[in-house]
Image (cartoon, rainbow, N blue to C red):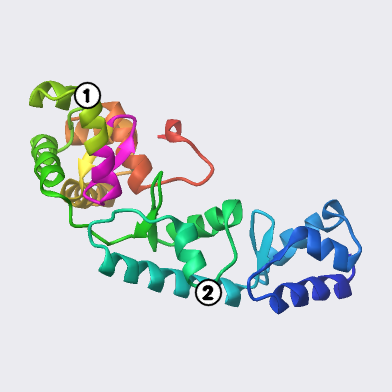
């Protein structure tokens, strides 16, 4: 593909403040998406354009979006301290960005990967925002956190928490989900929950172990007096390995 084509694509993307769709680029360049696939990949690698599910932005445009989105989201939290998650489309619309669906979801994922926001099932929040919970939720969540905190590493499963508190499992599942969305509990594996305070201590322990030994599931299991299930979950969370699964440990 000619240098002129590459330059034209970059110019088209830079000229559209709110992004331009693949279909529009192809129409302007006179090429099919298949023809331009390698060109898009190269321009992404060079850092000249960013792609979000068929919507292309310049790095500067995404930076503008991110700043506006984060500021508006922070302002929403200040005005609504009891609302845990916000629909990202509501925030995008509020800052005048006509983006929704998959492109917006991908843009939100990028902000999450950068550590700016948390994405839940029903919306997003600033990563370090802590909502003001209603009293009944606050009391219930605190009880669950006490049960989790009783075990530094081998925390009880939702089923075990249900048994210990004599509360239906469905209610435990709901409060754990709320705790995760609120940033007070973290889910790092199948049924493996920790409070945020536990996670901070566990990270210190694991990094101390890593200073003197190559970490593996068996080593962490023995050193921390736990099982492979918890060891793998902790390693995968704190020491993620690109393009690999938990079995690598």
Cα gap from disc 1 to disc 2, whole angstroms: 43 Å
In this picture, residue 129 sits left or right of residue 35: left
Which residue lies at the image location 52% right of the left edge and 72% below the top edge? Answer: 65
Could you say whether the residue bearing mark 1 is in a helix, strand or loop?
helix
Q: Which residue is mark 2?
A: 63
Judge by depth and name the residue closer to the eye, 133 or 56. 133
Residue neighbourhood size for the residue with mark 1, other residues' Cα within 10 Å, grouped as few (<14), some (14–19), many (≥20): some
In this picture, residue 77 sits left or right of residue 58: left
Which residue lies at the image location 41% right of the left edge and 43% below the top edge? Answer: 121
Task: State which quarter of the image contains the C terminus.
Answer: top left
Q: Which residues are magenta?
A: 176-191
Residue neighbourhood size for the residue with mark 2, other residues' Cα within 10 Å, grouped as few (<14), some (14–19), many (≥20): few
- Mark on residue 169? 1
Which residue lies at the image location 28% right of the left edge and 62% below the top edge? Answer: 128
Where residue 115 appears, x then y in whole percent? 39, 61
Where residue 126 appears, x then y in whole percent? 34, 62
Decide if residue 113 is in sight here: no
User: Which comes sooner in the sequence, label 1 or label 2?
Assistant: 2
In this picture, residue 93 sits left or right of residue 156: right
Residue 164 higher or lower than 57, as above or below: above
């Amino acid at each position: 593909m000619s240098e002129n084509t590459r330059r034209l694509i970059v110019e088209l993307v830079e000229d559209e403040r709110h992004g331009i769709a693949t279909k529009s680029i192809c129409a302007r360049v006179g090429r099919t998406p298949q023809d331009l696939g390698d060109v898009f990949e190269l321009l992404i690698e060079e850092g000249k354009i960013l792609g979000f599910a068929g919507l292309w932005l310049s790095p500067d445009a995404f930076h503008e979006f991110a700043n506006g989105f984060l500021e508006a989201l922070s302002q929403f939290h200040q005005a609504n301290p009891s609302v845990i998650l916000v629909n990202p489309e509501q925030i995008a619309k509020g800052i005048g960005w006509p983006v929704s669906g998959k492109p917006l979801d991908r843009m939100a994922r990028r902000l999450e990967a950068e550590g700016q926001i948390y994405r839940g099932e029903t919306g997003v929040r600033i990563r370090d925002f802590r909502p003001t919970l209603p009293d009944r939720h606050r009391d219930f969540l605190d009880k669950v956190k006490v049960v989790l905190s009783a075990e530094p590493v081998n925390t009880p499963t939702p089923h075990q928490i249900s048994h210990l508190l004599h509360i239906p499992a469905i209610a435990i599942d709901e409060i754990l989900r709320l705790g995760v969305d609120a940033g007070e509990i973290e889910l790092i594996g199948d049924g493996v929950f920790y409070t945020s305070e536990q996670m901070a201590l566990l990270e210190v322990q694991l990094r101390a172990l890593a200073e003197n030994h190559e970490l593996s599931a068996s080593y962490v299991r023995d050193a921390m007096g736990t099982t492979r299930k918890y060891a793998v979950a902790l390693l995968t969370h704190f020491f993620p390995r690109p393009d690999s699964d938990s079995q690598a440990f």
